[in-house]
Amino acid sequence: MFVCECGGMLIPIAIEEPPEELSKEEKLIYKRVCDVECTSCGKVLYSQPYDGNESMNVVRKTKKLSEK
């Protein structure tokens, strides 16, 4: 879990889809990113590590998990 600078929890609101051209095996190891929103202050952070990434990735297209 991520923690916002205000102390609130950051929850994923969008997750990147792996590129279509990857094989099934490549998709399993592809390091996706996600957009997260703070449950306390509402701040949104983009392109955060999702699949155990150790560092930030370039901004990629994500898909909304649900509509508000």
Image: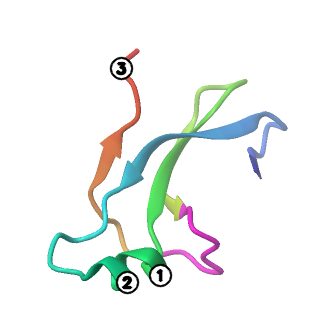
Q: Which mark lies nearer to you, 1 or 2?
A: 2
User: Which residue in the structure is indicated by mark 3?
Assistant: 67
Q: Main secondary structure of the magenta part?
A: loop
Q: Which residue is mark 2?
A: 25
- Say which label, 3 or 2, has the lower sequence index: 2
Q: In the orientation shown, which residue stands out farthest toward the front? A: 24
Of mark 1 and mark 3, the one earlier in the sequence is: 1
Task: Judge from the rendering whether residue 66 lies leftward or rightward of residue 49; answer left or right.
Answer: left
User: At 22% across and 71% down in the image, what residue appears?
Assistant: 19
Alpha carbon of mark 1 to alpha carbon of mark 3: how far? 28 Å
- Whole-percent x, y for residue 18 in the image: 30, 67
Under tag 1, what secondary structure? helix
Q: Pointer 2: residues within 10 angstroms few (<14), some, or many (20+)?
A: few
Instruction: Rate crowding at label 1 as few (under 14), some (14 to 19) or many (20 or more) other CA atoms within 10 Å.
Output: few
Q: Is residue 65 above or below residue 61?
A: above
Q: Position of residue 55 (x, y in %)?
A: 60, 80
